Image: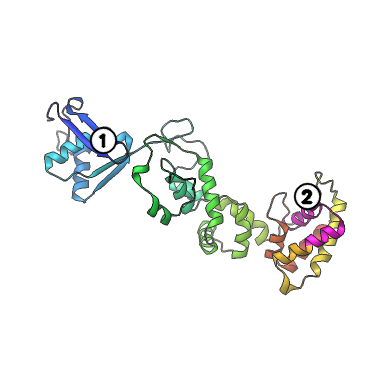
Amino acid sequence: KVEPNKWVVFNDLIRKKVSVNTDTLGDFAIARSNGNVLYYLANVLDDWLQGVTHVIRGEDHVSNTPKQILIYEALGAPLPTFGHIPLVLDSSKKKLSKRNVLPGVCVLISDFQEAGFIPEGVVNGLVFLGWNPKTTEEIFSLQDLEERFDITQVNGAAAQYDFKKMIWFNAQWIRKIELEKLQNYYADFSGETVELSMLAVAREKAQTLVELKDELSYLVSDPGIEKEIIGNEKWGLTVDAARKTLEKISEMLEGIEKEEWTRDKIEAVSVKKIADLGMKNGEFMWPFRTALSNRKGSAGPFDIAAVLGKEESLKRLKRASQI
């Protein structure tokens, strides 16, 4: 039984002051005729007995709160603090549902794991659904969020889920986290442990662990070489011209001692060689890179060569110059 014409008032962490007159509620059931307790009472009892101090839930539960406050009062139980966060909308501005999302869009933890997301990227992306630090900052670790997050700064309006932005956050974190941590994440994901130096190169072009696996493929094993890939119409570079350039690159790299074999050294001698040959950067760099990676898009040749080592780099270059 609900007392008529009574105002139920509570201060919501997000929606501020909320007032509801009991005349809009009417009497409501808290148990079935067979004695089974219904949601309103069960929820209040569970929270009270477990010592819950803050109830944070979706705004679609706002209508339940006045009824539950009446139950708290009837039981003589202390009221928790309530906060009703806005709903998350999909790309059509409808309530986001795990049953009705576009193919490839992740909403479940298992979806994110399978798609190669890492925890830091997911947490960072999700916290921006309705909250922002009132600055231009976007990259926050969990520790940062523990220090900066304030639920009273959550917007009252619904947030639209942008999966492309989630991918962006994940890419930032793949490049940002410690290599050892990324190595562990990748091992859990793929069952493979790869060298830190290879991860350092591959992660620069990867947005997810799936893409990281793809980027690592030409570093951890020989990708072979396709004849057509070393030529490039944009640079006016024929396959024959590319072969000759590769021969000159091989000669150049032969002159680097193994103990000097570093990215910086390879870059330094390459810059000098380009100047000596009077070539454009692209004419030199394209065959150099594609001979090592067998890809039109990959990490730069200096990075790849440094990771592969002198012997493997020369093997791939010489093979490409002879096809």
| Rendered location of residue 130, percent (x, y) | 41, 40
Q: Secondary structure at mark 2?
A: helix
The quadrant in which residue 289 appears is bottom right
| Rendered location of residue 196, percent (x, y) | 59, 64
- Decide if residue 33 is in sight here: yes
- The range drawn in magenta is 270-293
The answer to whether the residues at label 2 and label 1 have Cβ atoms under 8 Å apart is no
- Give the residue displayed 54% in from the left and 46% down from the top: 168
- Judged by its main secondary structure, the magenta piece is helix
| Rendered location of residue 175, percent (x, y) | 56, 55
Q: Secondary structure at mark 1?
A: strand
Instruction: Tell me the quadrant of the picture where the C terminus can be found.
Output: bottom right
Q: Which residue is mark 2?
A: 229
Q: Check disc 2: other Cα within 10 Å, few if <14, some if 14-19, many if 20+.
A: some
Count the marks: how many?
2
- Give the residue displayed 69% in from the left and 60% down from the top: 303
In this rendering, is residue 62 above or below 313?
A: above
- Decide if residue 38 is in sight here: no
Instruction: Tell me the quadrant of the picture where the N terminus can be found.
Output: top left
Residue type for callout 2:
Ile
Q: Which residue is mark 1?
A: 17
| Rendered location of residue 145, percent (x, y) | 41, 52
Front one among 278 and 179: 278
Residue type for callout 1:
Lys
Question: Is the image coloured rainbow, by chain, by secondary structure, or in one colour?
Answer: rainbow
Instruction: Report, in whole angstroms, how far the alpha carbon at label 2 lies from the one at label 1.
Output: 66 Å
Tell me the number on the disc at residue 117.
none
Q: Is residue 268 left or right of residue 106?
A: right
